[in-house]
Amino acid sequence: MEEFPLFSVIILNYNGKKVLQSCIGSVLKTDYPDFEIVLVDNCSTDGSIEEAEAAFQGLKNLKIIKNPRPLFYAGGNNVGFSHARGKYVVFLNSDTEVDPQWLKELARGFRNEGVGAVSPKVVYYSNPATIDNVGQDLDIFGFGFGRGTNQKDSNRFNEPTEIFSASGVAMAARRDILQRVGVFDDKFIFYYEDTDLSWRIRLSGYKIMVVPRARVYHKVSQTTRRYSAIKELSYNARKNRIATMFRNYAFINLFLFLPVTLLFYFLMYIKELLVDGNRGMANTVIDAIKWNIDNLSDNLAKRHEVQKNIRKVGELEILGKMHKFPLLIRYGI
């Protein structure tokens, strides 16, 4: 194994004037001999990309890609991947800063050839003693939540651990596996694209690990929310959850668990309409289901690709890493 294989760090920017330069600056201080930064700008209008060009001009390990229109999280990162050269590819939110040793620790996580993707420990920038996530948990009904979110950072979160899904805040994967299973689905826009990708990596026979000694500091809510309101975020999460289950579950488990998920959606609709009095939010449930019906042919095609060409492991192995208790009851709908 190469001692220091090349890492490509993809940073996606959209009007990130307050955070972009500090993110790039922290990555440039990384204590690792071979990495490149692929900065993808999603048609920013706040001068952030121009400031970054001026501040970091002449750096040989920084390439800047300017998209002609916003492609959101999924599409923007896919563009970055198409320009990345590294053996390992990191997707890093622009509202983060990184520990200088982070890439060395991520590289250690890949020493096991059976590991396909690695998550660092992500803590809150404003309160580093509190966990943002150490990867993500997923239950059998498709509901995912950050593992350890809002808990005190303790010895419990210090050991490398197998997880179901890496977090899109900061996740690294083997380039050859991404070429095999695909990267993010552009239609997802944002939310669940990391879970969908992680599921495909797992189905292809690889583990996903969190490596807590790799630390990333997250400033929270300074990226996705620039794109949209909370209602739009909920709509995308809800439509993408259904699509992720539909594409990746074997038929028997899709038949068993998707109806329960839709029952939870019905309860969400009732709560948001009658208890919260928020018709707009409640309607995102209906719109999410309608989107999946309207995109059924695309979902079927992607399901066929996953089940016929990507899947190498059985459902018992996948279910073994999922929570059987509905996580939304623990964390709230």
Image (spheres, grey):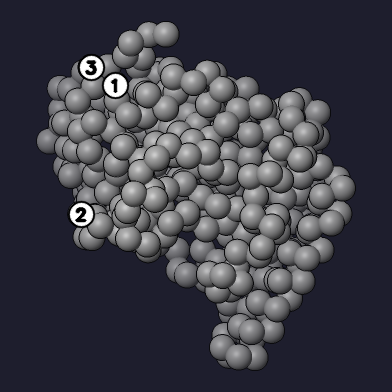
Disc on the earlier residue, 1 or 2: 2
Occupied quadrant, residue 235: bottom right
Disc on the earlier residue, 3 or 2: 2
Residue furthest out toward the front = 155
One can see residue 240 in this view: no
- In the drawing, does residue 15 fall left or right of residue 188? left
One can see residue 101 in this view: yes
Structural distance between the alpha carbons of marks 3 and 2? 28 Å
Residue tagged 3: 33
Residue 180: x, y in percent?
62, 22
In percent of the image, x 66 and y 65: which residue is there? Answer: 326
In percent of the image, x 47 and y 55: which residue is there? Answer: 146
Amino acid carrying label 1: it is Phe
- In the drawing, does residue 35 fall left or right of residue 289? left
Q: Looking at the image, which is closer to me, 175 or 296?
A: 175
Q: Which disc number belongs to residue 150?
A: none
- Mark 2 is surrounded, within 10 Å at the Cα level, by few (under 14), some (14 to 19) or many (20 or more) other residues, namely few
Residue 249: x, y in percent?
76, 45
Residue tagged 1: 35
Residue tagged 2: 18
Task: Tell me the SS state at disc 1.
Answer: strand
Discs 1, 3 touching: Cβ within 8 Å: no
Structural distance between the alpha carbons of marks 1 and 3? 7 Å
Task: Tell me the SS state at disc 3.
Answer: loop
Q: Vertically, is 75 above or below 33? A: below
